[in-house]
Image: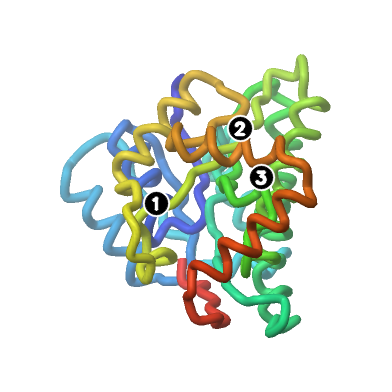
């Protein structure tokens, strides 16, 4: 799969930065979108210093501004001669709060970024791709979208929403030449998961899995395999049994209940 022009959100850190670096090193012009200008410029300079054929085009953007986001996608299309090959909606945020302490502002922030902005990114790119019968759109979801986890109501809901959004797109896009890919990772070691003490997948390893999946054209990819298998198996349990087990796990886990929202990517 030849990627010459790409647009990636959340590109100043974590998976987004890793994916932008990969495709630029492979020769693509990557429009890398994020709020942190200094990080984007640092990434662009790193790629330029390597002297390869690809480059990073920094796009300083708050993707919760839908009009600015659509304008950025269309601007990247124009710069690419109307031919964006790949669009990855990667930017996201996490948060933890028990329903007994939930705050509507946190819920809104998570849904605005993880659902609205992600879906707008994809929707803005699709018309041009459909017109020329070529292109790939990708959303970075999560294994958390498969089940309702303790203290993660808004986050799990946001990832479940984009999973279903992409599933519907795949139905509609059949025969158009445009592919819709859903990536559902488990925990990857990024800024968003920095406080987590348990073992996590390295960004570079996750990037390799994602890039390989996109190249193959897989419609859905969930990893790492053992955790994805467990997550899917949990979904087969009767819901009342799952909810009882989840409450028990939540009590035994013993972590303090806090509201943590991160939007830095």
Q: Position of residue 147 (x, y in %)?
A: 67, 49
Nearest the viewer among 235 and 52 is 235
The residue at which mark 1 appears reads as 188
Structural distance between the alpha carbons of marks 1 and 3? 17 Å
Q: Position of residue 81 (x, y in %)?
A: 56, 36
- Asked if the residue under mark 1 is in contact with the one under mark 2, i.e. CB atoms within 8 Å, the reply is no
Q: Which mark is residue 146?
A: 3
Kindly report which numbered mark, 2 or 1, lies closer to the viewer in this rendering: 1
Outermost residue on the top side: it is 175
Q: Which mark is residue 199?
A: none
Q: Residues within 10 Å of mark 1 (few under 14, many from 20)?
A: many
SS at badge 1: loop
Q: Position of residue 213 (x, y in %)?
A: 48, 26
Kindly report which numbered mark, 3 or 2, lies closer to the viewer in this rendering: 3
Q: Residue at x 53, y 51 (%)?
A: 90
Q: Earlier in the sequence, mark 1 or mark 3?
A: 3
């Amino acid at each position: 799969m030849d990627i010459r022009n790409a647009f990636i959100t959340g590109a100043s850190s974590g998976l987004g930065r890793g994916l932008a670096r990969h495709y630029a090193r492979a020769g693509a012009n990557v429009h890398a979108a994020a709020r942190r200008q200094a990080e984007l410029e640092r990434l662009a300079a790193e790629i330029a210093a390597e002297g390869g054929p690809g480059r990073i085009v920094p796009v300083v953007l708050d993707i919760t501004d839908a009009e600015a986001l659509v304008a950025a996608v269309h601007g990247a299309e124009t710069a690419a001669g109307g031919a964006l090959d790949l669009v990855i909606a990667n930017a996201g945020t996490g948060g933890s709060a028990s329903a007994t302490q939930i705050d509507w502002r946190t819920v809104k922030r998570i849904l605005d970024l993880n659902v609205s902005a992600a879906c707008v990114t994809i929707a803005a790119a699709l018309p041009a791709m459909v017109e020329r019968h070529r292109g790939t759109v990708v959303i970075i979801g999560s294994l958390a979208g498969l089940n309702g986890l303790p203290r993660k109501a808004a986050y799990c809901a946001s990832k479940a929403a984009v999973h279903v959004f992409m599933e519907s797109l795949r139905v509609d896009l059949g025969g158009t030449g445009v592919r819709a890919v859903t990536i559902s990772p488990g925990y990857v070691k990024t800024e968003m998961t920095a406080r987590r003490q348990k073992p996590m997948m390295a960004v570079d390893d996750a990037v390799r899995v994602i890039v390989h999946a996109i190249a193959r054209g897989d419609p859905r990819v969930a990893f790492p395999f053992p955790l994805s298998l467990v997550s899917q198996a949990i979904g087969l349990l009767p819901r009342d049994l799952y909810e009882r087990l989840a409450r028990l796990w939540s009590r035994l886990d013993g972590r303090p209940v806090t509201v943590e929202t991160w939007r830095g990517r």
